[in-house]
Amino acid sequence: MTRNIFVLTGAGVSAESGLGTFRDKTGEGIWAKFDPMKLCSPEGFARDPALVLAFYDGRRRNALAAEPNAAHRALARLEAELAKRGGRLTLVTQNIDDLHERAGSRLVIHMHGELLKARCARCDKVVEWLDNLTLADACPACGAVGTLRPHIVWFGEMPLHMDEIGWALQQSDLFVAIGTSGAVYPAAGFVAEARAMGIDACEINLEAADNALLFRQRRYGPASETVPAWVEDVLADRTVDG
Ligand code: BV8
């Protein structure tokens, strides 16, 4: 029985909840419409903070209006069931929505930050933020005005919780990537790190990701179907051959 499972999720797990992905083949992805360097980088924020804040305001509203789907719920169930059996699910997400939490997952590591939080550039405090975020807003912790930014990791910035992630990966006996294109590092490199440590790897995606060849097990289809089926197989101990 696989007991310590490390799951990395990407935008594909939230796609059926109506939240956009970034790079899908149809060319409809977020980065096909918007320039990531203008909207998802510290340089872009310095150049035009109002534009970046408005971009994330729209995504925050969408995330708050979205509902978790069967894939989110299946991962919450897996976490609870593994804990009952003395195992552990480490859920690391590249996503900035809170759908994993709203589906019932208790331990979610947001390596690219969280849309529903803001961070003060003056006192570095992270605060919950559910409304639009503007330069006129004051930091609830230190009172400074105009120093709040989304608590999100932009390109060129250090992802969060990397030490905890590295430790959890080393302790796992299965690495599973769900709904991610394998295009953004260092997350895209986790599978190579797992394989180098002799940890088995499984890809669950709509279609093969850029780094698909590194996965021994592969399951393709919409996450709302493939993830619940995979969780059933894990809990019934039927996943040895992928
Ligand atoms: C950093 C912010 C230094 C929030 C994002 C090598 C090593 C290290 C860094 C680099 C490197 N090479 C290049 C870099 C720099 C850069 C990078 O990787 N650039 C890429 C473009 C080449 N990386 C960075 O800058 C990172 N920081 O490197 O710091 C460092 C170095 C080493 C160690 C530590 C630190 C910071 C990266 C974070 C940037 N922030 N987002 C936001 O606005 O959302 S990244 C952006 O892409 C997204 O936010 C998302 O988090 C991320 C990954 O995208 P995916 O989640 O995979 O989404 P995508 O659309 O691409 O794919 C969706 C998948 O779902 C597809 O496969 C699709 O088929 C599938 N799908 C669709 N529908 C469904 C489905 N699957 C199932 N069911 C469905 N229904």
Image (cartoon, helix red, strand yellow):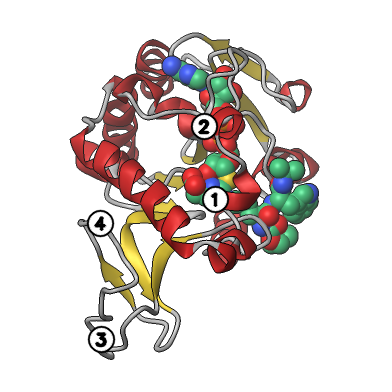
**What amino acid is at disc 1?**
Leu
Q: Which residue is nearer to you in this view: 18 or 195? A: 18
**What amino acid is at disc 3?**
Ala
Q: Is residue 152 left or right of residue 34?
A: left
The residue labelled by disc 2 is 30
Disc number for residue 39: 1
Task: Look at 32% across and 40% down and name the residue there.
Answer: 79
Label 2 – label 3 distance at C-alpha: 33 Å
For numbered disc 3, what is the local secondary structure?
A: loop
Residue 82 appears anywhere in the view? yes
Label 1 – label 4 distance at C-alpha: 16 Å
Task: Look at 73% across and 25% down and name the residue there.
Answer: 210
The residue labelled by disc 4 is 132
**What amino acid is at disc 4?**
Asn
Label 3 – label 4 distance at C-alpha: 18 Å
**What amino acid is at disc 2?**
Ile
Task: Look at 57% across and 68% down and name the residue there.
Answer: 46
Disc number for residue 28: none
Q: Which residue is nearer to you in this view: 235 or 125? A: 125
Q: Callout 4: few (<14), some (14-19), or many (20+) C-alpha neighbours within 10 Å?
A: some
Q: Is residue 131 left or right of residue 145?
A: left
Q: Where is residue 166 in the image (x, y as percent from the top left)?
A: 62, 58
Residue 242 appears anywhere in the view? no
